[in-house]
Image: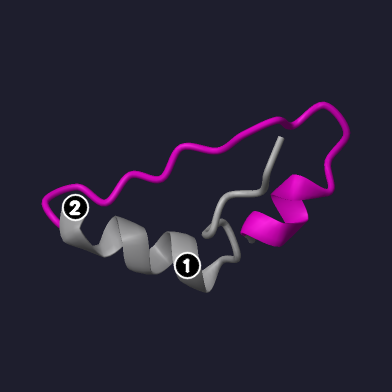
Amino acid sequence: LIQRLREIPGVRGIHIMAIEWEEKVPEIAKASGLLPRPQL
C-alpha cells in the first residue's frame, strides 16, 4: 500500500498511526522501505 501511495503524483509523505502500538512504527517503516531515510 505504501509503495502504491508513493507512485501517486503530488504525494510527498505519509503518516503512520499505530494507536496504542507505537513501538511497531519503526518496524512498519523498515518493512515498507521507508527506513533508512534517503539523503536529500
Quarter of the image that includes the N terminus: bottom right
Q: Residue furthest bottom?
A: 31
User: Which mark lies nearer to you, 1 or 2?
Assistant: 1
- Mark 2: few/some/many CA within 10 Å (<14, 14-19, 20+): few
Asked whether residue 17 is drawn in magenta, I would say: yes
Quarter of the image that includes the C terminus: top right
Asked whether residue 36 is drawn in magenta, I would say: no
Front-most of residues 40 and 24: 40
Q: Which residue is mark 1?
A: 30
Q: Which residue is mark 2?
A: 22
Picture coordinates of residue 24, whole percent (x, y): 25, 64
Disc with the residue nearer the chain's start (1 vs 2):
2
Left or right of 8 on screen, residue 34: left
Please tell me whether mark 2 sits on a helix, a strand or a loop. Answer: helix
Left or right of 11 on screen, residue 35: left
Picture coordinates of residue 20, whole percent (x, y): 11, 51
Q: Main secondary structure of the magenta part?
A: loop
Q: Amino acid at mark 2?
A: Glu
Magenta stretch? 2-21
- Residue drawn at x 35%, y 68% is 27
Quadrant assignment, res 34:
bottom right
- Mark 1: few/some/many CA within 10 Å (<14, 14-19, 20+): few
Please tell me whether mark 1 sits on a helix, a strand or a loop. Answer: helix
Left or right of 28 on screen, residue 13: right
Q: Amino acid at mark 1?
A: Lys
Picture coordinates of residue 12, whole percent (x, y): 70, 30
- Residue drawn at x 66%, y 49% is 38
